[in-house]
Image (cartoon, helix red, strand yellow):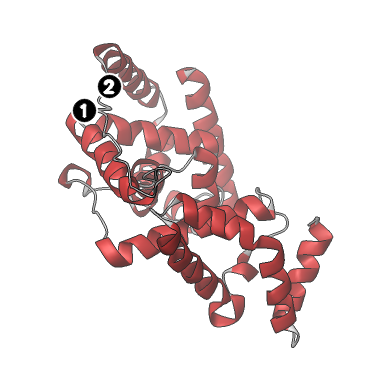
Amino acid sequence: MCDQDIAALLDALRSSSSRDAWVGFLESYSPVLYQTARACTRDEDAAADCYLHICEQLARNRFQRLLKFKLAGRASFITWLRVVARNLCFDWHRSRSGRHRPFKSLQHLSQLEVEVYNCRFNRGFSQEETLQKLESTFPGVSLSELALIEGRLHSSLSSRQHWILSTRKQLVFSKTIASVGEEGREQSVDVIDPRPDQETLIVGRQQQAQLEKCVASLTTDERLILQLRFGEDLSLAEIAHLTGLEDAQRVHRRIAAILKRLGAAMQ
């Protein structure tokens, strides 16, 4: 569907003919939803249950989730829909197996950092998918900002914790994407030790040292703004009030400029 078709679909879902629009949506996008469910489940029966969960949640509260899509957003509708469907798949799994909390060493994380941690380290989202997930709660987060947060999280985890995270994902997906043989017998999925080698660890330490050096070169005001935003998890409006800047947009431009300089220095 083109943007005009998507806009017409969303308008129809808001109208009295929403039932017909929902049927049309399923006719067009059921393959996408089922493929997503199948990729996150161990067999066709589980995929069918997960697919039904996705559809139920998309239809819930008069299609509230679907109506959140923004035509002027970063992603196309089908990309956005895949991200939403994957989130609902994880919700479906969590309802059966529970949700893992961050390690104790990461209990100090801000809300933004927790979301990045869950997306990048727990769920294995790509950076683009993570930005799409963050857009509704933390609008304006840039790729360079995400990379800095991810770098801090990465350096805060020990090699053992990295191994645990990767093993945890492998164990979950050994249930969800275990391959099935021609005779229907489930084949095991080996869990590979993903701990980084010595060279990777050295490079990571060098990058962390470089980042700390770059941050130290900032002015006191610039470090304060970053601390308020990423350390204290304050909103842009709250930062503007505390620092005397005019408004949230001015704070956003200031943070973007700081992060751009840091990114250039890191490169």
Q: Nearer the viewer, residue 114 or 100?
A: 100
Q: Residue at x 38, y 47 (%)?
A: 123
Please state which of residues 173 and 122 is positioned toward the viewer in this rendering. 173
In the image, 101: left or right of 244? left
Instruction: In this rendered view, identify the residue nearer to me: 213 or 154.
Output: 154
In the rendered image, which residue does mark 2 sit on?
196
- What's the residue type where badge 2 is placed? Pro
Alpha-carbon neighbours of circle 2 within 10 Å: few (<14), some, or many (≥20)? some
For image coordinates 56% across by 71% down, the residue present is: 58
Disc 1 designates what residue? Answer: 159
Q: Is residue 164 left or right of residue 33?
A: left
Residue 146 visible in the picture = yes
The residue drawn where x is 31% and y is 43% is 169
User: From the viewer's perspective, is 64 left or right of 18?
Assistant: left
Q: Is residue 247 visible?
A: no
Percent coordinates x, y for residue 129 in the rendering: 53, 45
Q: Quadrant of residue 224?
A: top left
Considering every residue shown, the one lying at the far right of the view is: 4
Could you say whether the residue bearing mark 2 is in a helix, strand or loop?
loop
Residue 135 position within the rendered picture, expressed as x and y whole percent measured from the top left = 54, 54
Tell me, for residue 188, which label it has, or none. Answer: none
Residue toward you, 240 or 85: 85
